Amino acid sequence: MSQVELKDITKRFPTVTALQDVSFSFAHGEFFVLLGPTGAGKTTTLRIVAGLEKQDSGTICMDGQSIDRRTPAERDVAFVFQQYSLYPTMTVYDNLAFPLRSPLRRTPEPQIKIRVEEAAEKLRIAHLLKRRTAQLSGGEMQRVAIGRAIVREPRLFLMDEPLSNLDAKLREALRVELKHLQKTQGSTTLFVTHDQIEALTMADRIAVLNEGEVVQQGTPDDIYDRPATTFVAQLVGTPKINLLAASRRDGTVHVRGSGLRVPASRYALPETFLMGVRPEDIRPDPQGPFGAEVTLIEPLGVETILHLKADELPLLSLVPGMAPQRVGDRIRFAIVQEKLHFFGLDNRRIAEERT
Amino acid sequence: MQMATIELQKVEKRFGDSHAVKPLDLTIRDGEFVVLLGPSGCGKTTTLRMISGLEAVTGGKILLNGKDVTWNHPSERDMAFVFQFYALYSHLSVRQNIAFPLQAQGMKRDAVDRRVKEVVDILRIQHLLRVRPGKLSGGDQQRVALARALVRQPSAFLMDEPLGALDAELRESMRAEIKNLHIAQHATTVYVTHDQVEAMALGDRIVVMSAAEVQQVGTPIDVYYNPANLFVARFIGSPGMNLIKGRYEAGAVRLPGDNRYPVPAPWSSPLANALAGQPEVVLGFRPEAATVTPQGALSGEVYATDMHGGYTVLHVNVNENEIVHIRSDRQTSFGMGARVRFDIDAEMVRFFNPQTEAALRREAAR
C-alpha cells in the first residue's frame, strides 16, 4: 500500500476545464473521500489517478515517485465502479479469481484458492462462491466486485460511488462493512461520492470538490464543524444549515428580518455578512430568548424537523425524538452560541479570533 | 375543495396464482394524507393505480364517499394523479400545461385564468408561466405537475413517488412544500414511496406494505415506536431497529456473546404467555434507545464508528458479526475493537416472536 500525492492537476476538455490545479495527498492506510455534486470533477480525478485519463498538467506521485508515465496496469490500482461489471456467466469464484489468473500475474491455483476464500470470508459471500453472478442481488454483486478488487492486493483502491445503486438499507449496511474492512486491512482508498453522509461516516479525510476546484480538505469534523465556505456548509448536514443575512451593530449581530440578536465578540465581523446555524443548534426552550411560530412539523422517528418562523425569518430546527409541538404553536427557542458560523459576503468563513 | 373518503374493501390484484396485492381493507378519511410505503415490488403502486382506476381490481370494492366506483373510468373518479416523471407537454408553455385540464373540460377563459393564477400563487411559479417545461429544473417541473393536478380541484390526489427523480437536497425542500400544500388545501391524498423518511415526514398515517400484503397501518409514531412485526421494525428508521435473537429464561433474555438482559417488569408475563413453551425471542431496540455506560447490562466490541454530522453512530459487534447500532453524541469516541458496555432504555425495548415475526404487546400500565 502506498502514499499518494496529486500536485496541481489540471484537465481541460474541449468546452470546459474539468479540473483546475487540484492538489491533495493521502497517506498509507488512509480512507480519503472526494465529495462534490455532479460535474464537480470527482470521477475525472479518479480516472486520472487510475491512468484511464491523462492530465494536461500537474503530476501524480505514489510513494514519492511520479506515476504519470505508467500505464493503468503498471500503477497497480483496483477500480470499483457504481456498475458492478462482473462476468455474468462465470461463478462468483471465477469472478474473484479472474484478476489473479491474468497473464500478468499467473498466480498458481492453490494460492488463488486461498486468496479467494479469504476475500469471500471477509465480505460474507463464502456461501455464494459456486453461484453465477447473474443470480445475485445488487448488494451481493457489489460485494463480489469489491472482493475482486481485494484479492489483487493492489497498492491503491479507487472507488467510484460503489454504493449508490443499492437501496437505502443495503447502502447503510455495506457502508459500515466497507469501513470496517478498510480499517482492518489498512488499505489505502480513494473513494468518490456525492453523498455527504457517505463522506462523513466513512472518511478519515475529505476533499470537497466544486466546479473542478478543491474547496476544502479536512477530517469529517473539520468539514462539518468548520466549513470553509457557504458551499461546504450547505453541502454537509441534513436538514441544511440555516444561512441568515446579518449585520453588526454595537458588538451585536442583528439577523435581518427578525429580532434575533447574538453577541459578536469572538469574531472580527465586517458590517454585513452571513450567519450559519445548524438546525440541531436551534433548540426549543421555554426560557429561550427568542420567539417563533411553528409552521410545519416533519417527524422522522429518531428526530423531528420543526419549521419555524421568527418574525419574517424561516428557520429549521432539528430536535430529538417526537416533538410535542403542533403547527401554529408559538414557541421560545435558544441558539447554541458556540456553534455559530460566520461567512463574509464572498462566502468565505470568518475565523474565530483567538483569545 | 371537495370531500373525499376513499374506502378499499378486500381490494386485490391477482395474476394467475400469484398476488400483486392481497385482499386489502383500508379507509382513507376526508382530508387525510396516507402514505403507502414499502420496497419495490411490494404492491404499493398497484394499489394506488387501482384506486385511480388505471388498473382494474381482480376482487373487492373501491368506494368514494360511500359510492361504489370500482368499475368507473379514471376520469369519472375525480382524482388527480401526480407521477414521478412529470408528464408535462414539452411543446406547451407552463401556463398552457397548467390550463390544459380545465380547457379540456371546456371551462370559460376568465375562469381558467382565475384558477391558474390561484395555483401558481400557491406554488410560487408565477415567474415561470411563459417558459417551456424543458427549460425548467426538476423541482420546478414537479411544481408545474403539482399545479396541473391542483388546478382541477379534484376530490383527491394520488401521488406516485413524485420526489423520486429529484436529488437529495431538492427532495427535502419539495417534501416540505408538499406538506405545506396539504396543510393549506387539506385534500385527501394517497402518496406512494419507498423512502421511509419521506413517509414519516409526510404521512398522517402510513400503510407499510411488503410482499403484496399490508404489514401495519399507523401514525408515524405507531410504526416507529411500536412496529407490528420484524419487517416494519427493520424497514422504518435509519438504521432500522436493532434486532437480536435470544432465549427467554427466568426473567431474562440470554443473548449471543454471553449477554443477559433482565426483562423489565411489564414484559415478564407477555413473554411467558406469548412464547408458550418455546423460549426463542427477538429483542428489539432503536439505536437511540441504547446508552454506552460502564454499568451496562450488555457488551460487545466496537466494529466501526461513524460521524453523522450532529451525532455519532457506534456499531458494536455483540457476537460473530451480530452488529448493533447505537446512536450517541459526538463527544463519545471509541477505537475499533474496544469493549463497550451498554444499556437499553426500559421504555424503548421491544420483543418479537421469531416464528410469527409479530411484536409482543406489553401489559398496559395500571
Image (tube, coloured by chain):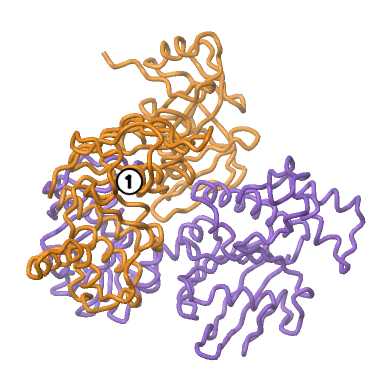
**Left or right, B157 with reference to B273:** left
- Other-residue count near label 1 (Cα within 10 Å), few / some / many at <14 / 14–19 / ≥20: many
The chain to which mark 1 is attached is B
Q: Which chain is orange?
A: B
Give the structural element (helix, strand or loop) at label 1.
loop
State the count of labels: 1
Q: Which residue: 89% across, 59% down?
A: A107
User: Which one is in front, A202 or B278?
Assistant: B278
Q: Is residue B340 visible?
A: yes
**Left or right, B289 with reference to A54:** left
State whether residue B360 is above or below residue A164: above
Q: Which residue: 30% across, 38% down?
A: B70
- Counting from the top left corner in percent of width and height, residue B45 is at 40, 46
State whether residue B249 is above or below residue A37: above
Occupied quadrant, residue A300: top left
Residue topped by disc 1:
B53
- Counting from the top left corner in percent of width and height, residue B51 is at 31, 43
User: Which one is in front, A28 or B280?
Assistant: B280
- Counting from the top left corner in percent of width and height, residue B321 is at 63, 37
**Left or right, B198 with reference to A187:** left
Q: Which chain is purple?
A: A
Given the current orientation, which residue lies at the most extreme left position? B110
State whether residue B349 is above or below residue A299: above
Occupied quadrant, residue A311: bottom left
Amino acid under disc 1: Gly
Q: Which residue: 75% across, 85% down?
A: A69
In the rendered image, the quadrant that contains the C terminus of chain B is top left
Q: Is residue A350 visible?
A: no
Q: Which residue: 80% across, 62% down?
A: A99
- Counting from the top left corner in percent of width and height, residue A131 is at 75, 45
**Left or right, A213 with reference to B129:** right
